[in-house]
Image (tube, rainbow, N blue to C red):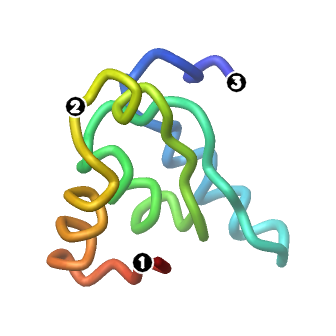
Amino acid sequence: MNHDGTRSGYPCDTFARLAETVHIPIIASGGAGSVTDIADVLTAGRADAALAASIFHFGEISIGDLTRQLAAQGIAVRQ
């Protein structure tokens, strides 16, 4: 919650610890400022999905570009 709207990255270590504790899908929210932030939370943060808004609203990246860049890094993306 403290990262929401900051565009400074997700708290990946928090999500990774959560993934060790629960056995349900984890959806990361709050902090997406770049493709790297999203890739990091899906890999190091072990999140199953990531929410992002500001980077799309302000036109910093399109959903298509994000999808392509994540796929190029070997990160599975549903379309």
Amino acid type at circle 3 is Met
Ranked by sequence position, the earlier of labels 1 and 2 is: 2
Ranked by sequence position, the earlier of labels 1 and 3 is: 3
In the rendered image, residue 42, in percent from the top left (x then y), is placed at 45, 64
Residue 68 horizontal side relative to residue 38, left or right: left
Tell me whether the residue at label 1 lies in contact with that at label 3, contact meaning CB atoms closer than 8 angstroms: no
Tell me whether the residue at label 2 lies in contact with that at label 3, contact meaning CB atoms closer than 8 angstroms: no
Q: Residues within 10 Å of mark 1 (few under 14, many from 20)?
A: few
Q: Nearer the viewer, mark 1 or mark 3?
A: 1
In the rendered image, residue 18, in percent from the top left (x then y), is placed at 73, 57
Which residue bears the numbered disc 1?
77
Residue 53 horizontal side relative to residue 60, left or right: right
For the point 53% across and 48% down, the residue is: 13
Measured Cα–Cα span from mark 1 to mark 3: 24 Å
Which residue bears the numbered disc 2?
60
In the rendered image, residue 30, in percent from the top left (x then y), is placed at 57, 32
Which residue bears the numbered disc 3?
1
In the rendered image, residue 57, in percent from the top left (x then y), is placed at 40, 26
What secondary structure is marked by label 3? Answer: loop
- Depth check: give the residue in front, 11 or 61: 61
Amino acid type at circle 2 is Glu
For the point 57% across and 47% down, the residue is: 51
Amino acid type at circle 1 is Val
Q: Quadrant of residue 55?
A: top left
Measured Cα–Cα span from mark 2 to mark 3: 22 Å
Q: Quadrant of residue 25?
A: bottom right
Q: Residues within 10 Å of mark 3 (few under 14, many from 20)?
A: few
Q: Residues within 10 Å of mark 2 (few under 14, many from 20)?
A: few
**Is 65 placed above or below 58 here?**
below
Measured Cα–Cα span from mark 1 to mark 2: 19 Å
